[in-house]
Amino acid sequence: MDVRDIDEELKEMYEEGAGSAKVLNSETLKAPIKSLPLAPPTSVEVGTSILDAVRVMQEKHTGCVLVLREGKLEGLLTERDLLMKSLGSGKDLGETKVDEVMTRSPEVLQPDDMLAFALNYMHVGGYRHVPIVDSDLRPVGVLSIKNIVDYLADYFPQEVLTLPPRPIRKTTDREGA
């Protein structure tokens, strides 16, 4: 495949879906968080062992669990918490409680808050997950970086979703002898 073939293929790919696309601008970031499809929150109770919390995370295929006390958010246990605060520390994961390694009183947002706030929390705080709670601190969801990427990809369906499985690269080796 030579460079002209690649250029032609890319041109066709971009022209196929050239219709009315969503417009990504500052108004887009004013959309409420509830406009994104959030998975129900995965949670454990205060006093749960780290080992049991990890099993829940594995079962639900999630990178974090919310830690609740009587249905209200007390903390957040993430993969990062597990790596930095418990694994390799010599702690018995079956005996150590999530309360000892979780992030206490994490930053939270509510469903009507703007997406811009979530992006700000994630960017400035370095968070990959932001709990979404009601006015009584009862969890209604967790916004993840994946939710944000999916949301943004919807604004560029042709540019993102129709790409070939691997980047097309020019060869750097000379062909022939």
Image: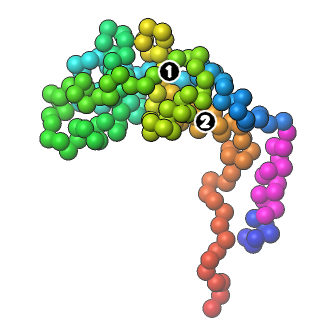
Q: Main secondary structure of the magenta part?
A: helix
Displayed quadrant of residue 111:
top right
Q: Does the magenta run of residues contain 18?
A: yes
Q: What range is drawn magenta here?
A: 7-19
First in sequence, mark 1 or 2: give its number: 1
Query: The C terminus is located in which quarter?
Result: bottom right
Displayed quadrant of residue 64:
top left
Q: Of the residues shown, which amino acid type is indicated by label 2?
A: Asp
Instruction: Give residue 120's mark.
Output: none
Q: Does the magenta run of residues contain 26?
A: no
Crowdedness near tag 1: few (<14), some (14–19) or many (≥20) residues, C-alpha within 10 Å: many
Q: Of the residues shown, which amino acid type is indicated by label 1?
A: Leu
Displayed quadrant of residue 18:
top right
Q: Nearer the viewer, mark 1 or mark 2?
A: 1
| Residue corresponding to mark 2 | 150
Query: The N terminus is located in which quarter?
Result: bottom right
Label 2 secondary element: helix
Label 1 secondary element: loop
**As rendered, which of 109 and 92 lies closer to the eye?**
109
Q: Name the residue rendered at 21%, 25% in the picture.
A: 97
Picture coordinates of residue 57, whole percent (x, y)? 36, 30
Picture coordinates of residue 133, whole percent (x, y)? 47, 16
Q: Is residue 18 visible?
A: yes
Q: CA distance from mark 1 to mark 2?
A: 19 Å
Q: How many marks?
A: 2
Task: Please indicate whether residue 9 sits to the left or right of residue 57 in the image.
Answer: right
- On screen, 133 above or below 97? above
| Residue corresponding to mark 1 | 109
Q: Name the residue rendered at 59%, 38% in the picture.
A: 149
Q: Is residue 57 visible?
A: no
Q: Name the residue rendered at 26%, 17% in the picture.
A: 46
